[in-house]
Amino acid sequence: MTVSECAGLLRGNDNFLILTHARPDGDTLCSAAALCNALRRMGKRARMFSNPEITENYMSFVMEYLSDERHDEEYVVSIDLANDNMFPKGFSGNVELSIDHHASNSGYAAHTLLDAQMAACGEIIMSLIRELCNELTLREAELLYVAIATDCGCFCFGNTTARTLTDAAQLLELGVNNGELNKAFFRSFTRARIALEGMIYSSLKSYCDGAINAVVITREMMRSSGATENDCEDLASLPGKIRGNIVGITVRELADGRSKASVRTNRQVDASAICSRFGGGGHFMAAGCTADMDPYELAGRLVETAGSYLK
Amino acid sequence: MTVSECAGLLRGNDNFLILTHARPDGDTLCSAAALCNALRRMGKRARMFSNPEITENYMSFVMEYLSDERHDEEYVVSIDLANDNMFPKGFSGNVELSIDHHASNSGYAAHTLLDAQMAACGEIIMSLIRELCNELTLREAELLYVAIATDCGCFCFGNTTARTLTDAAQLLELGVNNGELNKAFFRSFTRARIALEGMIYSSLKSYCDGAINAVVITREMMRSSGATENDCEDLASLPGKIRGNIVGITVRELADGRSKASVRTNRQVDASAICSRFGGGGHFMAAGCTADMDPYELAGRLVETAGSYLK
């Protein structure tokens, strides 16, 4: 389906319910909010599903679009959801339209607008709003800037293309204060997060000439740093910051005494194969498992297993 | 002077010596290398001054342009040097042409091409090479990508404009592998750097509801982390990562027993005023001082002084 066909579908309908995915990130939330804003500008009824997992850093951006008030025969549009396992908590039902940038989109919706070349779903929504309304408002531009920038690590990840940068440039030309948004999303951290990172870095152990790096996050570290779940975003990426890393292992002690591991790899090693040895699974470059061991023991066992895959 | 006038000046001359600034960064080095490459393509003799302070992360990018071989009557062009205090170690003499993006450029050169709107000098060099040669080569595009990206924190700092993003997009269209370059410059760190950051974060102390944040780097931390000077880039920015920070203080213990402090502030407090109390100075938002105290004592005194400026 083309952007223009998708715009036709939206024009011909009303009473939109816009879905964001489970454990929502900036792209799903702010793309959904921008589309909701545009649909309201067109005189349509539109609301975002009140995803219970929205973190506080995004709340001020999406609050005005969230609503629990139902309308008759809502037209359900999902944003950035590759499959129905990603439905937000509390939602079940059919999706009329899926707007997505995951090549793995399972085709669960009646209609799908998919562009897997885009770094962020926000880039697709940007084209779509232009098709629907000609222009973007400053509010929409701000939302789409956050959607795009958060999905490509502020233009630093490998998914950033010339198109991503050009789209972002056009959003700045509409008046987006990128300096302020970048400061909030990428350059400032809570005291507790920094304290926790300090402890995690101090726990880091390297093996096989730095090809395997492992960190442990204990409940005691969480307690003494004062960190909450809001401070724990993307901890699994920390061991991968070490130059020369191939397998990054992050093990967290759970409240029930078990331990949960995230394994991230580059293209050389299959993370899901490593995790499957411990009853877990996932993707080639990002997988996980939960085991009835203390975190240091699980980390040690994972390092050993990873070592055997390196050879 | 316009870009086109500057191009005329370069066309009319030969035997170029291209200067980079003291404590050189990615912008001065890679902008100079790109210009040197373009001048050589035009059949000119051109070399970069062998700045003795080039760090190893940039060496592979600039090596082929460095030369100590002198030619008669060299035409000296400085890149990214705001004033003659920034001359590289080992250089003295006159500068024919200064190409710069610092509004504070002192006018020390016979001719100056200045555009203070640019986030990086690399953006000016990009226009200049197009004027000189019509097209950029892939090598020049790579060099200019590194120049621009490193000067704006990979498009995250407040100096990033729509123009910066558009320029970078054009460089990617020429084939620059931004994913690989970003990984090298922004997303991978030595084991020693991470260990040192862990210790620094653990030493972080916050005052005045988080408005003042101070860290100490002792010689023992350097020793036990295995960090060298190459691992110490931009440590002064670390306290500023704390949400709500106004004054960030970084104090480092020197080999001679004295201590050296960097003070970074936002627009609310004058860092140079704080440092001048200890015989130092600098700019409004970034200043420093060296004192005959142990690092914890100097940090404490600076926190006290900063506190009096906050009120």
Image (cartoon, coloured by chain):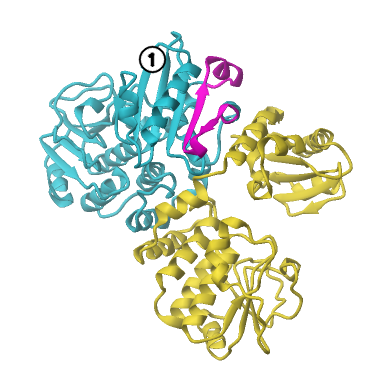
Chain colours: A yellow, B cyan
Q: Amino acid at mark 1?
A: Ala
* Image position of A70 (left or right of B293): right
Q: Is residue A191 above or below residue A70?
A: above
Residue position marked by numbered label 1 in the rendering: B291
Q: Position of residue B251 (x, y in %)?
A: 46, 22
The quadrant of the picture occupied by the N terminus of chain A is bottom right
Choose between A10 and A49: the one closer to the eye.
Answer: A49
Span colored in magenta: B201-227
Residue at the image position 15 percent from the left and 44 percent from the top: B11
* Image position of B110 (left or right of B20): left
Judged from this view, the residue extending furthest toward the bottom is A12
Choose between A262 and A101: the one closer to the eye.
Answer: A262
Q: How many marks?
A: 1
Chain designation of label 1: B
Q: Does the image show residue B281?
A: yes
Residue B30, quarter of picture: top left
Q: Position of residue A291 (x, y in %)?
A: 86, 44
Judged from this view, the residue extending furthest toward the top is B256
Q: Does the image show residue B174?
A: no
Q: Position of residue A55 (x, y in %)?
A: 63, 57
Q: Is residue A5 above or below residue B288?
A: below
Task: Assess whether residue A282 is covered by the magenta stretch.
Answer: no
